[in-house]
Amino acid sequence: MTEVVETVKELVTPILDEHKFYLFDVQFVKEKKSYYLRVYIDKPGGITIDDCVLVSDELSEKIDELPEDPIPEAYYLEVSSPGAERPLRNEQELKTAINEYIHVSLYKNLDGQKAYEGDLLSVNDDNLKLQIDDRKQTVIEIPRELVAKARLAIKF
């Protein structure tokens, strides 16, 4: 499955470069009896359905042009945005999310809670700083070693 992902990354990268999109992730997974090739793309300002259709059509063409099919199984191709609540998987994505509203899940309780939501104020090697209450201007520092997962969140 790793070979499929790498091949698709190589095929889709020039397409994305041409349209000034970037690759968020590629997954090739089996769910029940079906295989899914999922390509997550993004761009500043967000991806539209038309962007997804464009990339899907061009990627399908590229795959069909290959002398040997890299995916021998029948599969569904899905091209989409990583979503409004996309995961923040690495340092760069965390830094890009500064001033965004995020959700942080923890490995263990911090001040009696295992999850926090708030505006990400800063990121450094030691902690994430979140403003968790707009009215009270409450700021919490979360040690990096406690962070299990972080993602963008929708503020209600």
Image (spheres, rainbow, N blue to C red):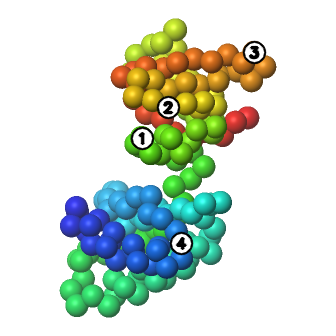
Residue 28 vs 17, above or below: the answer is above
Question: Quadrant of the image for the N terminus?
Answer: bottom left
Earlier-in-chain disc, 2 versus 1: 1
- Up the image or down, 110 lies above or below 88; here it is above
N-terminal of the pair, mark 4 or mark 2, is 4
Mark before the other along the chain sequence, 1 or 4: 4
How far apart are the alpha carbons under marks 2 and 3? 21 Å
Q: Which circle's residue, 3 or 4, is located before the other in the chain?
A: 4
- In front of the other: 114 or 147: 147
Q: Where's residue 119, x and y in %?
A: 64, 31
Instruction: Report the residue marked by disc 1.
Output: 91
Alpha carbon separation for disc pair 3 and 4: 41 Å
Q: Position of residue 151 (x, y in %)?
A: 51, 39
Residue 27 point in image, percent of width and height: 35, 60
Residue identifier under label 3: 136
Mark 1 → mark 4, Cα distance in angstroms: 22 Å
Residues under numbered marks 2 and 3 in contact, where contact means CB atoms less than 8 Å apart = no
